[in-house]
Amino acid sequence: MTRVNCLIVVGVTLVALSAPGRLAASSQGGQATEAMSAAAKASTDLVGALSKEIGSSPEQAAGAAGALFGVAKSKLKPEEFAQVSKAVPGMDLLLKAAPAMGGGTAGAVSQVAGAGGGALAGAASAFSKLGLSPDMVSKAIPVLTQYVTKSGGANIGKLLAGALK
């Protein structure tokens, strides 16, 4: 085998070995997009209002709402979150549409520290993964709480607002 042929074989082998990883990453990205799209369709009123407020696509808004509802779920008692969940059509899909939280940059954490820090820093990280500015967290929270108040009542809205402080 000549040197050129050997390099071609090595190159083809490297491409073949790396292709399964690329296909897996691609399909995971496709699954995330499908989840966001399904969530956007399941909760059109909420997603539409949030999309308008933060200047995002419906899919980004669905992921953002899911991230914030995930924060609320982690802070509320199960029976309290169940009440919030009843007020939001497609809650399970919104939660699935949220990107994994955590791993935020120091800048993202400091930007939301005044708005609650801690769990909200994770939401800021999720917003970044969605291509949204972390400071959009503070614009999204009132939209979610107003929606939940309107659809579930003042007490349920207060539960959510308290969890997202």
Image (cartoon, helix red, strand yellow):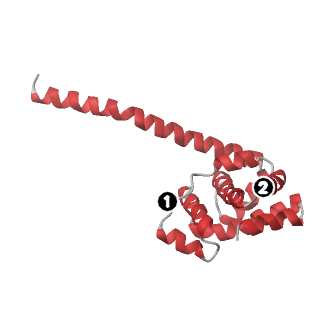
Which residue is the extreme one toward the left? 2
Instruction: Report the residue marked by disc 1.
Output: 103
Disc 2 secondary structure class: helix
Q: Give the answer, above or below, for where 22 lies relative to 131.
A: above
Which residue is the extreme one toward the bottom? 114
Q: Give the answer, above or below, for where 19 lies relative to 155.
A: above
Which amino acid does the dot numbered 1 rest on? Gly
Residue at image x 41%, y 32%? 20
Residue 157 in the image, given as x and y percentages of width and height? 83, 65
Which amino acid does the dot numbered 2 rest on? Phe
Residue at image x 61%, y 64%? 119
Q: Quadrant of the C terminus?
A: bottom right
Mark 2 or mark 1, which is nearer the start of the sequence? Answer: 2
* Separation of marks 1 and 2 at Cα, in angstroms: 25 Å
Instruction: Report the residue marked by disc 2.
Output: 81
Residue 14 in the image, given as x and y percentages of width and height? 28, 33
Residue 40 in the image, given as x and y percentages of width and height? 71, 48
Number of other residues with Cα within 10 Å of mark 2, as a class: few under 14, some 14 to 19, many 20 or more = many
Q: Give the answer, above or below, for where 33 lies relative to 79.
A: above
Disc 1 secondary structure class: loop
* Quadrant of residue 116 within the rendered picture: bottom right
